[in-house]
Image: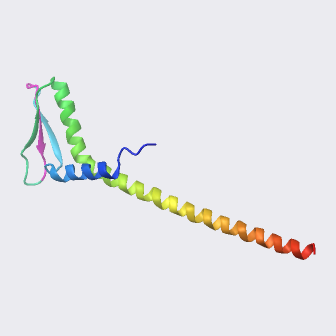
Amino acid sequence: MPDFLTPQALAELESLTRSATPGPWDVLSDPALACTWLSAAAPGDSGAVGLFDYRSASENLANAVFAAMARNRVAALIAENQALKARVQELLDANSREVDRRVAAQTERDRALARLKAVVRP
């Protein structure tokens, strides 16, 4: 399976997340208007972040909800991705150690059998 979230792509996402207006972001819309706003909802910052008004009202709302959701969740997704990759590596390392242990035990068993055969069949 290809790794679409390469270390470079994750670093770029982290950089974009850090440089964007801090979250969380809220979606503000008025049913009488076809436009939708994104607004910062961080303490001390309730300014507009973006305006969606070039598409239908439903598309503008859907796009704004998606943008707000992405802003509010991307950092957590990056952290979870990194934690899962680290866990996979831990499991691979543990599996490698177990394989090495079993190979060593098999080798020791084979040597013991050879010694036993040498004693039993002189």
Asked if the magenta segment contains residue 82, the reply would be: no
The residue sitting at the front extreme is 122
Depth order, front residue of 4/86 = 4
Residue lying at 17% horizontally and 49% vertically, measured from the top left: 23
- Image-quadrant location for residue 37: top left
> Magenta segment: does it hold 38?
yes
Q: x%, y% of residue 47?
A: 6, 45
Q: Residue at x 16, y 45 (%)?
A: 25
Q: Is residue 102 left or right of residue 95?
A: right
Query: Residue 119 in the image: x percent, y percent?
Result: 89, 76
- What colouring style does the render use? rainbow
The relative height of residue 59 versus residue 112 in the rendered view (above or below) is above
State which quarter of the image contains the C terminus. Answer: bottom right
Q: How many labels does the image show?
A: 0
- Judged from this view, the residue extending furthest toward the right is 122
Q: Specify the segment rendered in magenta.
A: 32-42
> In the image, is residue 105 above or below residue 50?
below
For this orientation, the residue located farthest to the top is: 56
Q: Where is residue 28 in the image (x, y as percent from the top left)?
A: 12, 36
Q: Which residue is drawn at 50% across and 59% down?
A: 91
Residue 14 versus residue 59 in the image, above or below: below
Q: Is residue 46 left or right of residue 97?
A: left
Q: Is residue 103 toward the left or the right of residue 95 in the image?
A: right
Query: Whole-percent x and y of residue 34?
Result: 11, 25
**Residue at 82% from the left image edge and 70% from the top image edge:** 113
